[in-house]
Amino acid sequence: MSDIRTKDVDDLLAVLAALDDEDTVFTLLEDLFTIREIRETSQRLAVARLLAAGKSYAAIEEATGASATTIARVSKCLSYGSGGYRAALDVLEGK
């Protein structure tokens, strides 16, 4: 288990898992994160979706405004990460 997985993190996970209304989750995100953090996190998910669809870095950069560094970081997580992006993309595909 990662060093970041603390009781406080587990509490946050429990709250997120229990919330089943998108508007309520959004209000929590607004309280927890800055607007910039919400936008950057959302951008990373958009990058993951485009990478999974086989888009080039240049096309992703143009579509999302993400830097090549961000795209590379997301790509690495998609290939070698713990599966979080894949789980998120599965949720979006089922939406």
Image: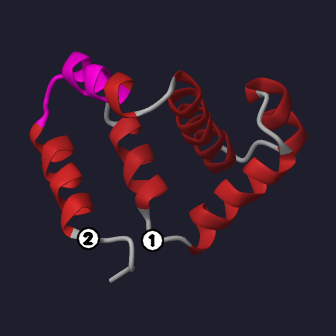
Is residue 21 inside the magenta stretch? yes
| Mark 2 closeness class: few <14, some 14–19, many ≥20 residues within 10 Å | few
Q: Quadrant of residue 60?
A: top right
Q: How far from the left and from the top, in percent, is residue 46?
A: 60, 35
Q: Which residues are magenta?
A: 19-29
| Mark 1 closeness class: few <14, some 14–19, many ≥20 residues within 10 Å | few
Q: Which residue is mark 2?
A: 6
Residue visible at 54% across and 38% down in the picture: 41
| Residue type at the position of mark 1 | Ser
Residue visible at 9% across and 41% down in the picture: 18
| Residue type at the position of mark 2 | Thr
- What quarter of the picture does the C terminus occupy? top left
Q: Which mark is residue 43?
A: none
- Of all residues, the one furthest to the right in this rendering is 58
Q: Is residue 90 left or right of residue 58?
A: left
Most foreground residue, 54 or 61: 61
Q: Of marks 2 and 1, which one's residue comes earlier in the chain?
A: 2
Q: Quadrant of residue 62?
A: top right
